[in-house]
Image: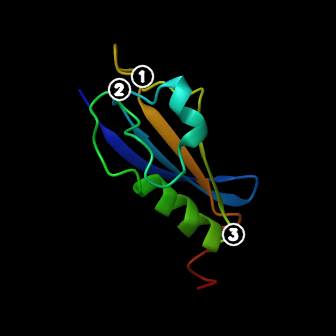
Amino acid sequence: QGFIRLRAAVVKNSVHLYVEDSGPGIPVEKRKILFTKFQDSLDSLNQGTGIGLCLCKKLTDLMNGDIWLDESYHSGVPGCPGTRFIINLNTPPISIDDA
């Protein structure tokens, strides 16, 4: 059963966003170029234009955040290692009372 999952958590008083999937994963040799513009497809399916992760990085930078690949992640689905990106917004959570 394949999945794409978005979740949020507070880690050390900072909001983290997690984007996880159960796809084919990203080959080790392509992990150093994840956030460059117009790179070759990152998976064996040859999907995409090579601009999405670059855009995510630039938007995260504009918000003074950080984004990275969690290389220790495994989806738990046999034969599908998956991928997890973590975005640290570098900001504490707000409560409804503070809004």
> Around disc 3, counting alpha carbons within 10 Å, would you say few (fewer than 14), some (14 to 19), or many (20 or more)?
few
Which comes before the other along the chain, label 2 or label 3? 2
Q: Residue at x 64, y 83 (%)?
A: 98
- The spot of residue 46 in percent (x, y) is 28, 36
- The spot of residue 82 in percent (x, y) is 41, 29
Which comes before the other along the chain, label 2 or label 1? 2
**Which residue matches tag 1?**
81
Could you tell whether 17 is left or right of 12 in the image? left
**Which residue matches tag 2?**
24
The C terminus - image quarter: bottom right
- In which quadrant of the rendered view does residue 79 lie? top left
- The spot of residue 36 in percent (x, y) is 54, 51
Seen in the picture, residue 96 relative to 70 is either above or below; the reply is below
Secondary structure under tag 3 reads loop
- In which quadrant of the rendered view does residue 51 lie? bottom left
How far apart marks 3 and 1 lie (CA) works out to: 30 Å
Q: Which mark is residue 64?
A: 3
Q: Residue at x 41, y 36 (%)?
A: 42
